[in-house]
Amino acid sequence: MFKFICYPKCTTCRKAQDWLSSNGVNYEVRDIKNDKPTLEELRKWYLQSRLPLKRFFNTSGLLYKSLDLKNRLPEMTEDEMLALLATDGMLVKRPILVGDGFVLVGFKENEWKEIL
């Protein structure tokens, strides 16, 4: 079973969830705001994803903008970025789909079709 980490009010998350359901994918839902990812989870997902760490940030979010992360992130270490992500689920890009050996960040239907 897959882990689907999302924010229920996010339209992209709802679109991804509808896609999973309509394609018969079994998953368990986790609300990223109420049950934020731990530092250990984020580190594991980051390594499994093989994506740049910046892709894990919700760059369109209000918190990202209010913290001026566009200018601060380039000067931060990976450990500092991961620790920051672990402080608030709203900083994390969503949805995240976690399966055996893969992590998908953000909903791109073609990418999800290819992996699933």
Image (cartoon, rainbow, N blue to C red):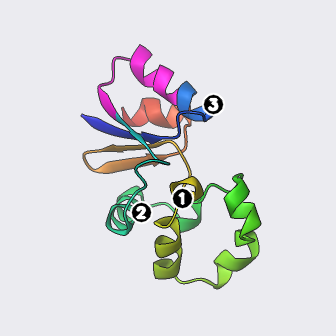
Q: Secondary structure at mark 2?
A: helix
Is residue 25 shown left or right of residue 88? left
Q: Give the residue at x 27% y 50%.
A: 101
Say which label, 3 or 1, has the lower sequence index.
3
Q: Quadrant of residue 25?
A: top left
Above/below status of 16 relative to 57: above
Type of residue at label 1? Phe
Say which label, 1 or 2, has the lower sequence index.
2
Say which label, 2 or 3, has the lower sequence index.
3
Query: Label 1 vs label 2: CA separation?
Result: 8 Å
Above/below status of 45 relative to 18: below
* Residue stretch rendered in magenta on the structure: 16-28
Q: Which residue is mark 2?
A: 46
Q: Which mark is residue 1?
A: none
Q: Which mark is residue 56?
A: 1
Q: Position of residue 50 (x, y in %)?
A: 43, 61
Q: Give the residue at x 46% y 66%.
A: 86
Q: Which residue is mark 3?
A: 11
Q: Position of residue 22 (x, y in %)?
A: 43, 14
Could you tell me which quadrant the C terminus lies in? top left
Type of residue at label 3? Thr
